[in-house]
Every structure is written in structure tokens, then in C-alpha cells.
Amino acid sequence: MGSSPTPSVSLFFNKMIEVKNLYKYYGEDPAVRGISFNVEKGEILGFLGPNGAGKTTTLRVITGFLYPTKGEVFIDGKNVLEEPLYCKKKLGYLPEDNPLYTDLTPREYLSFCAEARGIEDAQKKMEEVIEKTQIAEVWEKPIGELSKGYRQRVGIAQALLHDPEILILDEPTTGLDPVQIIEIRNLIKELSKEKTILLSTHILPEVQMLATRVIIIHRGVIRAEGTPEELSKKFKAKEISFALKGDENKIRERLEKADFVSSFELMSKEDAVYGKFLPKENGDPREKFAKFAYENGFLILELYSKSLGLEEVFIELTKEEQK
Ligand code: ATP
């Protein structure tokens, strides 16, 4: 057997984006507080968080539009601050507010972008992105007269123009109508066949539909990370539902004192007091609860742990924000 050829370094290198211990302050206010994560080649990473979580700030640092206060970002192994041109070639960016020149037509706008980026085979590249983003029919219309869905397409065409390996999309479906949302999501899905995608959104179904992996960010900190299935599993047994025979006030009073209960809800029905609680620690606290019920003289009628769906995990992790 002949020896196999030495593989190139890039075969070993799958981290297209590497964010290391990133901090960003605006004056005294921390927007991002020590986050680290990777985006692997070929994945769609959903960057999920409520408004103000720090998503846009993180994306701006990754794309080199903002300096980090502390920490580093690498694109395909190169530091964004040290090798900005290399990194910009690798990245296509659709900013949140998609700043388009409304007087220009898509043709004029993309020609301008191609020139600014020094793209040599501009005509060919433009034809490719027209095809990919399906904007041929609005090609000669002023951008200001286009629907929001078409504007997003033009924005994505702009991000794709230099044929980057990585696409960074900041809230790409915000402000679109339901039909446009589906069209843009389908386009993202199509693009993911050949691009690595970092998709920021606060819309959970978007992540469930598109992302292969999810990062939940809240108040500038990563609260959870994994595939949608992993996240649901991780929080399995977090929520315990029960039905007890006993006096509701007494149950409430005892639960308030129970050291393994983080928060709880109760509701009395004719036959029993129904409730659910979140334990203080990870793991399955049903044994503790059974002991608690026995010691306080409550008869257990039902007791089960519930696996939380991604939506419930998200709500749980970002609860303070929702209040
Ligand atoms: P959204 O979806 O609402 O854009 P986000 O998750 O993208 O939210 P960021 O826009 O990164 O969050 O904002 C994070 C925090 O930083 C917020 O508290 C925001 O008010 C603050 N912030 C963002 N940009 C600036 C700025 N240029 N100057 C001062 N504070 C800012």
C-alpha cells in the first residue's frame, strides 16, 4: 500500500469562526461579557437572544466593524485585527439594518459594492448572486421602491458578492411579512449547502427550523449551547410536575422553605393541588420531593419530570428579560 499524501493544514482546521473570551463595553456599560464560541465549517449556528442580549455587538466585532474591549476573534485561523483583509474576504455580512442606498437600483448598488471590494470578475459574480437570490425582476428598479423582502435579498446578494465562505446574517427576517419570512428562510437554507452561516435572531422557530447548533445569549453572557435536541435534553428533569392531596396554603408554605426548590407554581382543583417546580440543582429531584411530601403528610397523586422544549429552555434562561 502506498502512503497517502500529506493532508493540507486546512483539513485539520474546521473552526471558521473562533471567538475567545470576548468583552465589549460601551463606555461603562458591558454589552458582551467574556463570551467564547466556535462556528465550525458547514454549520448554521443560531445565535439566539432577546433584544439587547449582545448579538449585534458580537457580530460587529467578528466582522471587524467594532474593536473588542478584550478578547480575540479568529476567522479561519487568522486574527480579525491583525489580518483584516484576509478576514473580510472570508466573510459576507448582512447587517441588522441592511443599509442600502435607496436611490440606486440593485444593479448600480452591487456594481458599486463590487468596485469597492476590488472584485475582478464583477459581471460574472453579479450574475451568480442574481441567480442565487432571485432578484432579476427588480434589477433595474430603485431599491427604495422594492418590498422589504426584495431589499433583504439585495442585502444578501451584497453579502454573497465576493463569494465568501462564511455568511453572517443579523436578524435577516425582522420586519418581513409571513410569506417573505418563509422565502428568506428557504434562501438561507439553500445557501447553507455551500456556506458556513452564523445567524443571529430573537425568533425561536427560526433557529429550530434552520440551525444545526444554537447558542443562547442573554445580557452579554452565553447561557446555553448545543443542538436543539441537546439543549432540551440538558434541561430534562428540570421541571417537575406533581399533584398532591393536602391544603394548598400549607403546601405553599412548606415549598417556600424546601431547600431543593428554586421556584414553583400551584393551582388547586377539586381533587388535588396541582403544581410544578424548578429544582435548585441539576438532576432529578423526585426522590427529595417524595421525602418532602411524606414528611409533611401530603399524599402524592402524580409526580413526573418534564423535558423542556427549546422554547421553554429559552424562556427559562431569559426570564428576567421577559418580566
Ligand atoms: P437587538 O436584537 O435589540 O439588536 P442585540 O442582542 O443585538 O439586540 P446589541 O445591539 O448588541 O444587542 O446591544 C447590547 C447592549 O449594548 C444593549 O444594552 C444596547 O443598548 C447596548 N448598545 C448597543 N450598541 C450601542 C452603542 N453604539 N452605544 C451604546 N450602547 C450600545
Image (cartoon, rainbow, N blue to C red):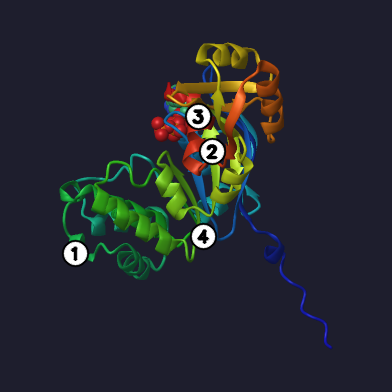
- Mark 3 crowdedness (10 Å alpha carbons): few <14, some 14-19, many ≥20: some
Nearer mark to the viewer, of 4 and 2: 2
* Disc on the earlier residue, 3 or 2: 2
Indicate which disc residue 105 carries. none
Q: Mark 1 or mark 4: which comes first in sequence?
A: 1
Q: Nearer the observer, disc 3 or disc 4?
A: 3
Give the Cα distance between marks 3 and 1.
Answer: 42 Å
Of the two numbered discs 3 and 4 on the same chain, state the one appearing first in sequence: 4
Q: Kindly identify which numbered label has been placed on residue 137.
A: 1
The residue to which callout 3 is attached is: 318
Q: Quick check: marks 3 and 2 in contact, CB under 8 Å?
A: yes
Q: CA separation, marks 4 and 2? A: 24 Å
Rendered residue at 61%/21% (across/down): 298
Q: Disc 3 or disc 2, which is closer to the eye? A: 3
Task: Give the answer, above or below, for where 165 lies relative to 24.
Answer: below
Question: From the viewer's perspective, is 166 left or right of 98?
Answer: right
Residue topped by disc 4:
165
